[in-house]
Amino acid sequence: MGTLTIRLDEKLERDLERLAKQTGRAKSDLAREALRRQLAIQRFRGLRHKAMPFAAAAGYLTDEDVFRDVS
């Protein structure tokens, strides 16, 4: 397992500390979860960007277009 050291501004540190106390979770657990979510979002955005030309060519320009064909 790797280690990452980051600097947090005072407000972010307070918010993280507060959330850790409220949830009974370690700050490092919360930070790992937030990082996992952010990485997943970035992967999704990358895949979406690659898929958009194909979707547009097939007539899928909005979410409604996709859901229209699913139902």
Image (spheres, grey):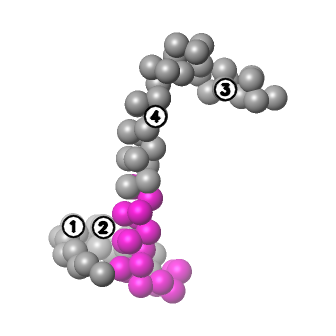
Q: Is residue 54 above or below residue 32?
A: above
Say the numbered circle drawn on residue 9. 1
Q: Position of residue 40 (x, y in %)?
A: 44, 53
Can residue 20 be seen in the rendering of this structure? yes
- In-front residue for pair 14/37: 37
Residue span colored magenta? 21-38
State the separation of the CA atoms marked 1 and 4: 32 Å
Q: Position of residue 32 (x, y in %)?
A: 38, 71
Residue lying furthest right: 71
State the separation of the CA atoms marked 4 and 2: 30 Å
* Quadrant in the picture for residue 50: top left
* Quadrant in the picture for residue 49: top left
- In-front residue for pair 56/4: 56
Dominant secondary structure (helix, strand or loop) of the stretch shown in magenta:
helix
Q: Residue at horizontal 66%, vertical 20%?
A: 65
Compared across the picture, whether 45 is left or right of 65 comes to: left
Q: Is residue 34 above or below residue 38?
A: below
59 magenta-colored:
no
Quadrant position of the N terminus in the picture:
bottom left
| Local SS, label 4 | helix
- In-front residue for pair 20/57: 57
Quadrant position of the C terminus in the picture:
top right
User: Answer yes or no: do the residues labelled 2 and 3 have beta carbons within 8 Å?
Assistant: no
Kindly identify which residue carries mark 2. 12
Which is in the foreground here, disc 2 or disc 3? 3
| Local SS, label 1 | loop
Kindly identify which residue carries mark 4. 48
Kindly identify which residue carries mark 3. 66
Q: Estimate how packed mark 4 is, as few (under 14), some (14 to 19) or many (20 or more) residues with alpha carbons within 10 Å.
A: few
